Amino acid sequence: MYRPVSQSTSPPPAVAALAAAILAIPLSAASPMAAQEEPDDPIARATSALRFRTIGPTIMGGRVSELAVVESDPSTFYVGVASGGVWKTENAGITFTHVFRDESTASVGAVAVAPSNPNVVWVGTGEPNNRQSSPWGNGVYRSTDAGRTWTHLGLEDTHHIGRIQVHPRDPDVAYVAAVGHLWGPNPERGVYRTTDGGENWELVLFVDEDTGAVDLVMDMADPNTLFAAMYQRRRRAWGFNGGGPGSGIHRTTDGGDTWTELTDGLPEGDKGRIGIDIYRGDGNLVFALVEADARGPGQGFGQGGGKNGVYRSTDRGDSWEQLSTTNNRPMYYSQIRIDPNDPERLYLGGAALYRSSDGGRNFTPDAAPTVHLDHHALWIDPANSEHLILAGDGGVSVSWDRSDNWYQLRNLPIAQFYEIGVDMREPYHVCGGLQDNGSWCAPSDTWSNQGIRTRDWYNVGGGDGFFTVMHPANTDIMIAESQGGNIARVNLATRERAGIRPRLRPTEDGEERTLRWNWDTPIVLSSHDDQVVYAGSNILFRSPDLGQSWEEISPDLTWNIDRDTLTLMGVAGGDPQMSRNDGQSNYGNLTAVAESPHDPPSFIPAATTGGCM
């Protein structure tokens, strides 16, 4: 169970930094390390006594990929986390147990409970998102004792799994929607089927090495009928192409032996990511959320064009009609859910949670206005439409009034850290930048017998949090940043903030110059002079006064390649593409910077996204 842990005295300063890095990892809620012989190395001896413990934060959750609820007892459900394994509750979220933590991967994309036997739980690893930070997994796992133990069942090279469907009467029959590699082609993608509990697999639907299955739904009244959303996409360091001719909807009516691509009424040409759902009360009623309008240069993500949106079939997919153009950022969400008791009530994932009360013709983005943005999973209780469970970048929330109000479950330590820092006070504080949840700090020790509590964490920055750099001598001063080089100096005593992002001076002839910042901008505080800070865009900057002023100390350190001249899956970067370059605002920037420990004026740009000169 996750509960606060009582603290002992702080570790010696010599191991404080190492301890901080260990303590700040959410997955550290593991069992004590096995006893080992005392090592000869003095540093190894000093650190061998350290034990993993979870310190949070729980106030801000990480990215949740999937929810799986035991429908015969909805107080029991599983939470699949993009980089935090699987958590289980048996009391509607009052406490959680980390049930998938000792396996060789922590990234989860799909979780499914067998309807005929809730002790049988399937997990597909590798979250099915397309972000630069989307970790991949190593296939499928199965538990036959309700999550206490797991067996790895192969499909290692599928990398990302979008959905698992289990036969309603036979827990050994399951289908896996494998998206495949994000950064390149591979043949292990499509829809897999097993009829013997995962001992053997058949690839029953395959399009090509660029196209995988991202969503999969089964008609529970006729489990031989399934719909698969095939998805062609590719990410590279310079950008993203989220569609192509391989994307589309396929249907089988014989349990996967044969498949038919469904096209009547759906957009012609290239498509992107697609989400599907079947109405429980009538298997002929199927809804799809379709990405179809390619984006050209200068076009960002959003609602999309006229072909994007919600499509409905009333004849089991034989024909479709478009009802709405609503489709918020398809490559990151594409989740559509029908109320199992009311086909007029639909929900769409997105930055906001969308809802419709007229069968999908009109949507409003007000289904969860008080919940953290970015919604990736939604479960609606088939026995009570007032009861919903919602999950995404902010963790897990529950509604008991059909999405009008929500309660966030703030007891899951699943925050995703991009970067971790530690200061030199006593007890030392651990700080870090979180995915989509700002930057937070907490003491490594407290006087409370409850250990480090939610209230002990304090916010020091917004946006996606990244580097948190603490001053070694003045613990009131730190530097925090959000995406794209938005750097701020923070006074922790007064809570004053000052933006210190470097800016370029115009050229001598007055021409404005622009900088290219990485999403996770590298920042380094000099170990030789605690007033000197380095920050890197495509140019390296140095500040002698903690960011009050900056000087350029390098030229452009990248190749400055025009990514519109590069191709993704045969499409030139400047041509229209689905979700074009979503998540990669620019290309050719620094990703890491290191200062020489021997020669203070020297520096080493360790890595760039455009090649280092």
Image (cartoon, rainbow, N blue to C red):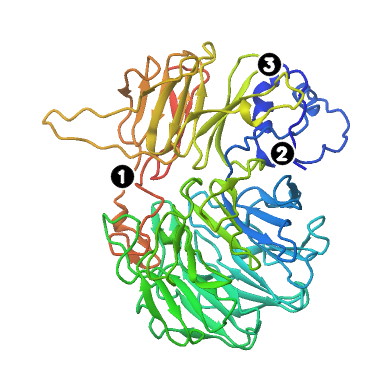
Q: For numbered disc 1, what is the local secondary structure?
A: loop
The residue pinned by badge 3 equals 13
Left or right of 256, for residue 503? left
Residue 562 image point, x, y percent: 29, 51
Q: Nearer the viewer, mark 3 or mark 2?
A: 2
Q: Is residue 55 above or below residue 610?
A: above
Q: Which residue is drawn at 73% across and 22% down?
A: 448
Residue 302 image point, x, y percent: 35, 57
- The front one of 181 and 276 is 276
Instruction: Report the amino acid beneath label 3.
Output: Pro
Left or right of 427, for residue 39? right
Q: How crowded is mark 1: few (under 14 residues within 10 Å), some or many (20 or more)?
A: some
Q: For numbered disc 2, what is the local secondary structure?
A: helix
Instruction: Report the amino acid beneath label 2.
Output: Ser
Label at residue 560: 1
Residue 582 image point, x, y percent: 39, 54
Is residue 209 visible in the rendered structure shown here? no
For marks 3 and 2, give the CA distance: 21 Å
The residue pinned by badge 2 equals 28
Residue 179 occupies quadrant = bottom right
